[in-house]
Image (cartoon, rainbow, N blue to C red):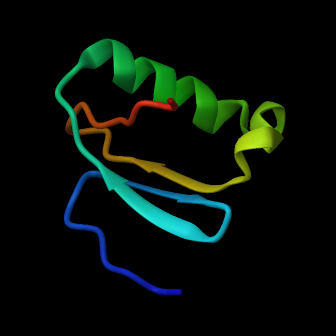
Amino acid sequence: MSRNCDYHMKVVTRGKISCFQTERTHVMRRISELCRKRRQVNSLHLISCKVDPLFAAGFHML
């Protein structure tokens, strides 16, 4: 399953690609933590996590 992301973040969860964009800095920090601690979020099946360092991008887990 391939899909282009026009947003600043591309997250693959359980084989489904979702694109998210937000200007909320605290969400950006949360995502950065998840990217660094990928091994601790196996329940989310987080396969890939890309964050654009030039823009505050992120997504809500729930």
Please give left or right for residue 27 compared with residue 30 in the image.
left
Please give left or right for residue 3 compared with residue 62 in the image.
left
Q: Residue at x 23, y 20 (%)?
A: 24
Q: Which of 38 and 16 is in front in this view?
A: 16
User: In the rendered view, would you say 34 is above or below 18?
Assistant: above
Residue closest to the far front: 62
Q: Residue at x 23, y 43 (%)?
A: 21
Count every numbered label the image shows and give the total. Answer: 0
**Residue 22: % across, % down:** 21, 33
Q: Residue at x 24, y 31 (%)?
A: 56
Please give left or right for residue 40 compared with residue 16 in the image.
right
Please give left or right for residue 6 compared with residue 41 in the image.
left
User: In the rendered view, would you say 27 is above or below 53?
Assistant: above
**Residue 31: % across, % down:** 48, 30
**Residue 30: % across, % down:** 49, 20
Q: Residue at x 42, y 30 (%)?
A: 60
**Residue 19: % across, % down:** 33, 57
Q: Nearer the viewer, residue 55 or 21?
A: 21
Residue closest to the far bottom: 1
